[in-house]
Amino acid sequence: MTNKVVTITLNPALDLTGSLSKLNTGEVSLVESSDFHAAGKGVNVAQVLSDLGAEVTVTGFLGQDNQELFTKLFNEMNAIDAFVRVEGSTRINVKLVEQNGSVSDINFPGVNVGAQAIEDFDKQLEALMQDHDFFVLAGSAPKGVTTEHINGWIHTLRSAGKKVIFDSSRNALVEGVKAKPWMIKPNEHELSDLVGSPLHSQQDCLNAANTLTQSGIDNIVVSMGEHGVTWLADNIHLSAKPPRMEVVSTVGAGDTLVAGFCWGQMQSMPAKELLSFATALSAHAVEQIGVGAKSTARIKQIQQQVELISLSTEETNQD
């Protein structure tokens, strides 16, 4: 077991989240409540892991002009700040959460990362590899960071025997997967991109995930929202369905699932316990605005209601 983990956020963001009854596209919409906080997929994962008891080191690229909310958050979670500072401001993303649970994301471009910053990050990663085994690389890439860079970093970590949990999308995901990260967590849309064909059913998702297990990725975790989570690995063919939740916001639920899986693996939880825990943690995330895992009692309560299903090898090997 280990409590030490590194989260990598190449393209963090300051999230401006507004809650409103209904978004009136092309017209004035009245926001009823709002929140402005440091975020980004890897930062969100770090927040949840910190709440669970992990010793977190955070790294990536951070704009030096508006870093105050990030440094404040890292201090609050007792995280070691290993971010490489770059010129300019970290992007602001706007998330509009409607009463019916619908979320509209407006994501702005990030900072421009130069060659010196990438060299500095390479050195930072090399140093962190000396005493960390778990690395979570999550989110998109800013300008200046290519899919080849992402592939290279995953390859470097994997070659050193590190467990890389990779959660991204689009070209970054497709290219990064070629480096065979230890775990990926696509949703059904991202899984479709990976296999290059549309997926119309849960069985299609199962078949696609099973295809990826043949490519050298140790753990495939497919998140399908209210339909639950499927985990395929060596001798593990499991699905989990959470209880019906009162959804406040789905923002951060996927990042929370990643954190749950990472923590469970770090603590060497048995497979069924790990899957039910990570599923419950993610389900709890939709009950709240913001990211975190403060209520252990509530998470345990949800975990007891998670339905686990063992998938037969026939189900996962259908053509």
Image (cartoon, rainbow, N blue to C red):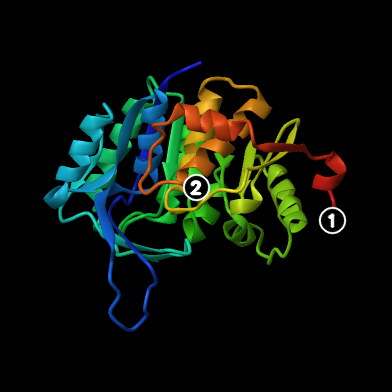
Tell me which residue sits at (26%, 57%) in the image: 34
Tell me which residue sits at (41%, 50%) in the image: 139
Q: Where does residue 91 sit, x and y in percent of width and height? A: 25, 58
Q: Where does residue 65 sit, x and y in percent of width and height? A: 12, 51
The mark found on residue 254 in the picture is 2
Quadrant of residue 241 within the rendered picture: top right
Q: Is residue 147 visible?
A: yes
Q: Amino acid at mark 1?
A: Asp
Residues packed near mark 1 inside 10 Å, few (<14), some (14 to 19) or many (20 plus): few
Q: Where does residue 182 sit, x and y in percent of width and height? A: 57, 35
Distance of label 1 from label 2 (alpha carbons): 28 Å
Tell me which residue sits at (29%, 63%) in the image: 109
**Residue placed under numbered mark 1 in the picture:** 319
Q: Is residue 87 above or below residue 164?
A: below
Q: Amino acid at mark 2?
A: Gly
Question: Does residue 217 appear left or right of residue 104 in this picture?
Answer: right
Looking at the rendered structure, the secondary structure element under dot 2 is helix
Question: Does residue 261 appear left or right of residue 204 in this picture?
Answer: left
Question: Does residue 257 appear left or right of residue 292 in this picture?
Answer: right
Q: Is residue 254 above or below residue 279?
A: below
Tell me which residue sits at (47%, 55%) in the image: 172
Question: Does residue 109 appear left or right of residue 6 in this picture?
Answer: left
Residue lying farthest to the top in this orientation: 1
Looking at the rendered structure, the secondary structure element under dot 1 is loop
Residue lying farthest to the right in this orientation: 314
Q: Could you say which is closer to the camera, residue 186 or residue 98?
A: 98
Q: Quadrant of the C terminus?
A: bottom right
Q: Could you say which is closer to the camera, residue 142 or residue 19?
A: 19
Quadrant of residue 111 within the rendered picture: bottom left
